[in-house]
Amino acid sequence: MSRRREVSGGEESTFDVRSRDLDIPFDQYERRPKFPVTLVLDNLRSAFNVGSIFRTADTARLRRVVTCGYTAHPPHLRLDKTALGTVEYVDTEHVESTMEALDNLQSRGMPVWALETTSASRPYTEVTYPRPVALVLGNEALGVEREVLDRCDELLEVPVFGYKNSLNVACTAAVVVYEILHQWGYQPAPTDPPPD
């Protein structure tokens, strides 16, 4: 759909608005390389937040989402509602505990970084992200479990300037994921290891 708008000086500009999904067969989409980012969800309470994270994982074409503990996982009605049909496009697995997920990832040599507001956390824009990387996102009220934080290779935070100490977990995921993609030039490298 093309829209016209006035710009300063009275001139008009035309631009297209993308209002449809990608128009390629699913098997062709599946062959496209994914960014080597794994999101690890540590006991998230809200299925709606989980659904929003799945939507971010799809739009950023991430490798995987790992749901842990009591985090909602597919199939789940409220998760599906917020994910807007993206669950089928995101590789996912569910494990009983976040420590089990970390054991699995770290045994394969994957760096695991947590997003949490701590006295040791570094701003998410002041680090260079390794390829591949796993990001742990924590419970909306309690954050990332302490034993999980102790096992992570790096602690990051999104700086906040208001009364509350943190940004919503789904918003945090989107902000940090797109910083990673920005640092990587928005291109999955052809030398990235294949998905597991």
Image (cartoon, rainbow, N blue to C red):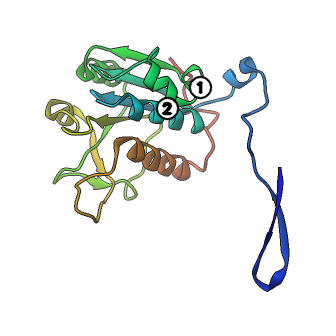
Residue of label 2: 82
Q: Would you place residue 124 above or below residue 115 in this image?
A: below
Q: Would you place residue 35 above or below residue 193 in this image?
A: below
Q: Secondary structure at mark 1?
A: loop
Q: Position of residue 100 (x, y in %)?
A: 27, 17
At 52% across and 52% down in the image, what residue appears? 183
Q: Position of residue 73 (x, y in %)?
A: 40, 19
Residue of label 1: 85
Q: How many marks?
A: 2
Q: Secondary structure at mark 2?
A: helix
Q: In front here: 81 or 58?
A: 81
Q: Amino acid at mark 1?
A: Gly
Q: Amino acid at mark 2?
A: Thr
Q: Position of residue 92 (x, y in %)?
A: 47, 19
Image disc number at residue 48: none
At 23% across and 22% down in the image, what residue appears? 99
At 46% across and 30% down in the image, what residue appears? 51
Q: Position of residue 126 (x, y in %)?
A: 37, 59
How far apart, in angstroms, are the residues tagged by discs 1 and 2? 8 Å
Q: Are marks 1 and 2 in contact (CB under 8 Å)?
A: no
Name of the residue lying farthest toward the bottom: 9
Q: Quadrant of residue 85?
A: top right
In the picture, measured across the screen, residue 152 lies left or right of residue 178, that is left
Q: Would you place residue 182 above or below residue 63 in this image?
A: below
Q: Would you place residue 27 above or below residue 15 in this image?
A: above
In the picture, measured across the screen, residue 60 lies left or right of residue 27, that is left
Q: Few, some or many C-alpha atoms within 10 Å of disc 1 (few <14, some 14-19, many ≥20)?
A: some
In the picture, measured across the screen, residue 19 lies left or right of residue 48, that is right
